[in-house]
Image (cartoon, rainbow, N blue to C red):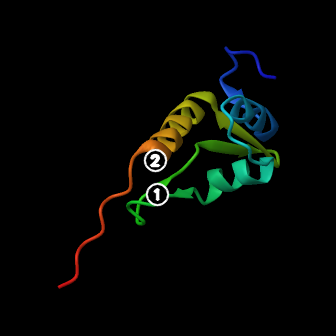
Amino acid sequence: MAPPDKPYLTPKEVVALLLQQQIEVTDDTVRNWCTVGLENKKARQLRYKLTGHKVGGRWWIERRSLEVFIRLLSQSESDPPAPAARRR
């Protein structure tokens, strides 16, 4: 696992940190979050994107970006869904 002061993480290190938060994903999913992002279920036009840089064919994810991303994930899962509009 990556030391806490390391500013950039590999996708495998991100997977290990997410497992500690009970979030189970693959390193392919982490790379996909860097390129495409994750759709916000409440506001579909808004996407959460993990900040990463591809250097020499390898992805490096910013630790600060991961911390914000995890916070956004936990907020979106804990917020109750918006009430549906009534049809008349």
Label 2, secondary structure: give it.
helix
**Total labels drawn:** 2
Q: Amino acid at mark 2?
A: Ser
Looking at the image, residue 47 sits to the left or right of residue 87; the answer is: right
Residue 66, how many percent across, how many down? 59, 35
Q: Residue at x 82, y 45 (%)?
A: 56
**Residue 9, quarter of the rendered image:** top right
Q: Residue at x 70, y 19 (%)?
A: 6
Label pair 2/1, CB-CB below 8 angstroms: yes
Q: Residues within 10 Å of mark 2 (few under 14, many from 20)?
A: some
Q: Amino acid at mark 1?
A: Asn
> Would you name the residue on which mark 1 appears?
40
Residue 7, how many percent across, how many down? 65, 23
Tell me if residue 59 comes above or below residue 41 in the rendering: above
> Would you name the residue on which mark 2 appears?
76
Residue 73, how many percent across, how many down? 53, 43
Label 1, secondary structure: give it.
loop
